[in-house]
Image: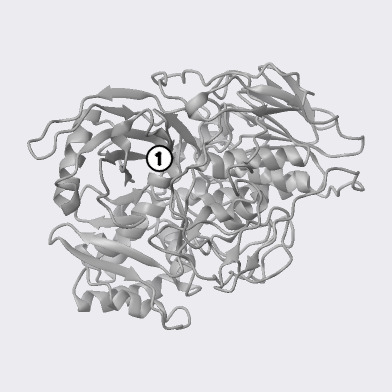
Amino acid sequence: MSVGTGTPSDAAPSQRTRAVTASPAAAQPAVTLAVGPPPAPGGHRMVVVGGGLAGLSAALTAADIGADVTVLEARPRLGGATASFARDGLWVDTGQHVFMRCCTAYRGFLRRLGVEHLTTLQPRLDVPVLLAGSGTNARLRRTRIPWPAPLHLTPALLGYRAFPLGQRLRAALAAYRLGRLDPSRPEVDGVSFGSWLARRGQSPATIEALWELLTVATLNAPADAASLGLAAKVVRTGLLERADAGDIGWAEVPLQRLHGEAAASELADVGADVRTGVKVRTIDRTATGWRVVTDSGTLDADSVVLAVPPPAAAALLPEGAVADPERFVDLGSSPIVNVHMIYDRPVLAGPFLAVVGSPVQWVFDRTASSGIAESVADHPERAGAQYLAISLSAADDWIDRPAGEIRDIFVEEMRRLLPAARDAEAVEVFVTRERTATFRQAPGTRALRPGPATGLPGLALAGAWTDTDWPATMEGAVRSGLAAAKVALGGWRPRPPSPGPARRLLPVVVTSGGAPAQLGGCGSSPVSPCKTSQSSRTPETKVPGERPSSSSPPGSSAPRPTGAPSAPPLPAASPQPSPPSTPPTPPSSPASPAPPASPVPPSSSAPPALPSEQALPTEQALPTEQALPTEQAPLPTPTSAPTSAAASTAAPGATPNATSISTASPTGGFPA
């Protein structure tokens, strides 16, 4: 049975290549360069099927300890659900992804890639909230007073003026009760979060303005349809266990550059073989290990990590790997819709805004990360423009609506919500759709999720949908890869290291102002860009069941946005010896420069090198979905602010959550 999409690579199975790709403004054919000879005998051969965050973290973990790793990805780029595509000179992320300070595995992954300096992390949790009904503003903000957890949450909730004081007190009590639940117990997982809240005296206004502000973003489901166990995990780890756990971070560059390109570069540096545009047909057990059959040939391996979504995993798993793999399909999927709006002037004064009582849920300023300043020469109307992305999670009511209808509703709604938008013109509006953004994180789904280990030695599963105790997040994706790598490697130990190129160490130096100074490395300057090492020789192709993309990115190389303001970067936790590719400091948003951040120490149960804990839910990148096809639709011409033609993009690339707020407890894995 055919699994995966994309055009297969015509590279021979033993060939190692590094692809050099161009920016969207000047696409060039990929050029392949030899990377290195085959590994010496005695090594461990691992094949990783799937190039999303789960597969990439597994591949890096194995390659770092000396395994001979081959990564196979059906798409023409790495990154899975957390990728970007090019559209008329812009880089558009496949979803609006943020993380939290408690996401230690994901942040370690960024450090391992040497790109953490390309993100911003808040000095303290601060979520501006607009109450659409009254037009008033509220803030969910961590106090400056160093109260210990979980007491730090009390002033934050009492100061959140989105509902009456009495309800705030009840909300604080409910939060502490949530922290006492055991999310792994079936009787907890089998109950809906909404019903539990109602029994604890939470009013509909409180549920909408507080609890669904969190659960719709993190679980991609409203409270009534969300698992209590997963909601309790989010609240406990993201808000209760540490005072600073919920501080929010985001990327200042396209996700393709942050994840896919940086990972391709690092994998090339450690001798891994990365092949994109390759379909995997079967995974067969042999007398000596495993054989992976692709459209371009076969690969023999000692172990295989299968980091693909549930339907693809069910089709590829050999007999005896798991009991009843067809149950994976019963996890279902939950969609996300993003409405992208380019205004002729700034209308939002901050990196993001949450909205209560409106179809608009979260609004993100993507002006800097999209590279819009670089496109002004070809699009003069974008001079001084602001690019906003409106994220709609749990988007069952929106996923099948016509692009023109969605456009009309949100252009008008933004005028109602933001005074500055009333006089501004939305010069471009387009829509991206992610039908299978996450698995449906409903009550009782825990029983459907397998662990990383299978019944066959050397075969492991990774992905957001596996049994991780966590919702579908970037943090979960990375953790799943770490756990799967340990299972797949088993008791193998690396051979004596052979001479090779020296690893880069990117030290972090604290300046007199307390912020680390960037000393260089991947993407640190226009003359020091991130390398790419993808081996795709073919362009992105039509996905079965999807319209062909008219705006697919030419390869996976993302431009370095220019013209973005440089604010103080994310500081280092402490001046410690830097791991490989320890990031210099990230440029922060102009609205929130980040002071030195205290690291989240590993828990006592955290494994030393290859974490034994199971995968967190990852961004699911169905191989049946590819780049985002566009459907053209004219903008409306309202009397107050006429608009120009807009495109609507159907987003087949699966994504974790619209806001993808990842929460996780401390873990080992990549060097902290």
Q: Position of residue 477 (x, y in %)?
A: 56, 48
How many labels sit on residues? 1
Q: Tell me if residue 131 can be seen.
A: yes
Q: Residue at x 89, y 47 (%)?
A: 497
**Left or right: 186 as drawn, with respect to 403:** right
18 or 667: which is nearer to us?
A: 18
The quadrant holding residue 193 is bottom left
Q: Considering only vertical position in the picture, is 608 above or below 410?
A: below
**Left or right: 153 as drawn, with respect to 3:** left
Q: Considering only vertical position in the picture, is 446 above or below 275?
A: below
Q: Which residue is drawn at 45% across and 30% down?
A: 86
The residue that mark 1 highlights is 373
Q: Position of residue 307 (x, y in %)?
A: 61, 38
Going by the picture, which residue comes out furthest to the left? Answer: 639
The way the protein has been coloured in the rendering is one colour
Q: Tell me if residue 418 can be seen.
A: no
Q: Which residue is drawn at 22% across and 38% down?
A: 426
312 or 61: which is nearer to us?
A: 61
Q: Where is residue 503 in the image (x, y as percent from the top left)?
A: 78, 49
Q: Residue at x 63, y 62 (%)?
A: 667
Q: Which amino acid does label 1 sit on?
A: Ala
441 or 619: which is nearer to us?
A: 619
Per the image, label 1 sits on a secondary structure element best described as: helix
Q: Considering only vertical position in the picture, is 396 above or below 219?
A: above
Q: Position of residue 456 (x, y in %)?
A: 73, 39
- Mark 1 residue crowding within 10 angstroms, few (<14) / some (14–19) / many (20+): many
Quadrant holding the N terminus: top right
**Left or right: 223 as drawn, with respect to 146:** left
Quadrant holding the C terminus: bottom right
580 or 132: which is nearer to us?
A: 580
Q: Considering only vertical position in the picture, is 249 above or below 643?
A: below
